Amino acid sequence: MSAANQVSLTTERVTLRRGLGLWDLILYGIIVIQPTAPMPVFGVIYTEARGHVVTAVLLALIAMLLTAISYGHMARIHPQAGSAFTYVGKELHPAGGYLAGWCMAMDYVLNPLICTIWCSKAAQNFVPEVPYFFWAVAFAAMFTLLNLNGIETSARVNAALAAALGIVILMFIVAALRFVTRNGIYTDWHNFTLPFYDPQTFSPHAVLHGTSLAVLTYIGFDGITTLSEEAHNPQRNVPRAVVLTCLVTGILAAVEVYLGQMVWARSGAFPEVDTAFVHVAGRAGGVVLFAAVNAALLVATIGSGMGAQLGAARLLYAMGRDGALPSRFFAAIEPRKRIPRNNVVLIGAISLVGALVMTYETGAELLNFGALLAFMGVNLSSVRHALRFKESARTGLALFGLLGLVVCLTLWLNLSHLAKIAGSSWACLGILLWFVRRPAMKAAES
């Protein structure tokens, strides 16, 4: 093949690879976040925010929209990168980038852990006679064994799952509207505002604490920035897709939890807090909807747990390869399946132990601890870049970034003391590791 033909073929491949438009990116973001994102955490937010789940979800939306603008700004400046690690490292300091990446690593590790907890509780809804311990062992082992065999969820399966979840959401919305109108619970229009503000239970601190948990609803929107090299006109479409994905997710989440609160209507404690939304669905649509929502969320969470475990294993592999972690263990590749087997088994063990000693709420708060710290770093990076360079929207970008930083810091401060202590310990371990492993990292770079 001639050199001219090779150049032509290379150019054609690059053009074909950049085939993702704006709505393709938005659909990808919604699939990653999942359209049922607020359902698993509904009961925890309801309890901590004293019934103000809608308010918490909408306040979290404000924080995420501001952060999404900063992510979009950074994606436009660094179109070939897409992570808090890169943005903070390039705009602030490599050590800050490492800390942001280290905090996000905690999120990757905790994600399969909370998926194990939720799957175990959901399975108990179907077979309550089997103890929680058995289900925790079964799901942690299943995630690990499937990932050790190299099984991954394909894009087509994700799209089909998103469509199935959309059908379940529609079923719930129809059942909830019928339940509210037929039972005459809300004969006074004032009662329709109670999910937003209930004077009998409202507490600013409780709502902010609930909001810090509601951030979990939006985790994953930043994944769109990793597609910059495959997107058509990434400088324009990626920033828009990040913001629109947060907006669509927030509106859909608000509708889901609003109807959930309307159906429950001050009915007291949930039979099981971690799977509260399943019981709400059962009240709205009976046994059939209870089973449908429970099964749909169980399948979706199994997929999330498997993907999260493999993603965590790959992140630890990358850190081991770069010298940030001992390479002999973390950078080892199983020759036959060509997967980081040591890391998969380690994450599986952490998930099992964590599922036995930790609650879903604690795991979610720890996950949000790392995410909010990384989000603060991206917001601060956006502010610094906007102030250093004279851009057309310099003032607006700096203002949005500053507001995002303040809001995320406020939510971070409203996490539980246990989450802040455990998360800070993890951050300090990362800082210590930075100094210890710095020579190995420099050697790996050279």
Image (cartoon, rainbow, N blue to C red):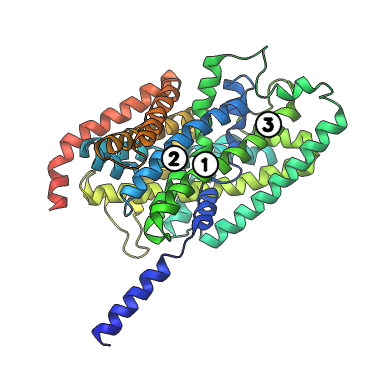
Identify the residue under disc 1.
Answer: 246
Q: Nearer the viewer, mark 2 or mark 3?
A: 2
- Left or right of 144, for residue 426: left
- Left or right of 301, for residue 164: right
| Observer-nearest of 26 and 313 | 26
Q: Residues within 10 Å of mark 3 (few under 14, many from 20)?
A: many
Report how far apart the C-alphas of labels 1 and 3 lie in the structure: 18 Å
Residue drawn at 34 percent across, 62 percent down: 338
Q: Residue furthest front?
A: 392
| Observer-nearest of 127 and 274 | 274
Residue type for callout 1? Cys
Identify the residue under disc 2.
Answer: 68
Residue drawn at 41 percent across, 59 percent down: 233
Determine which of the numbered discs, if any, sits on residue 58 in the image: none
Circle 2: element type: helix
Label pair 1/2, CB-CB below 8 angstroms: yes
Asked if residue 217 shows in the view, the reply is: yes
Circle 3: element type: helix
Determine which of the numbered discs, if any, sits on residue 258 in the image: 3
- Left or right of 36, for residue 259: right
Residue 41: x, y in percent? 58, 33
- Left or right of 167, for residue 370: left
Q: Earlier in the sequence, mark 1 or mark 3?
A: 1
Residue type for callout 3? Tyr
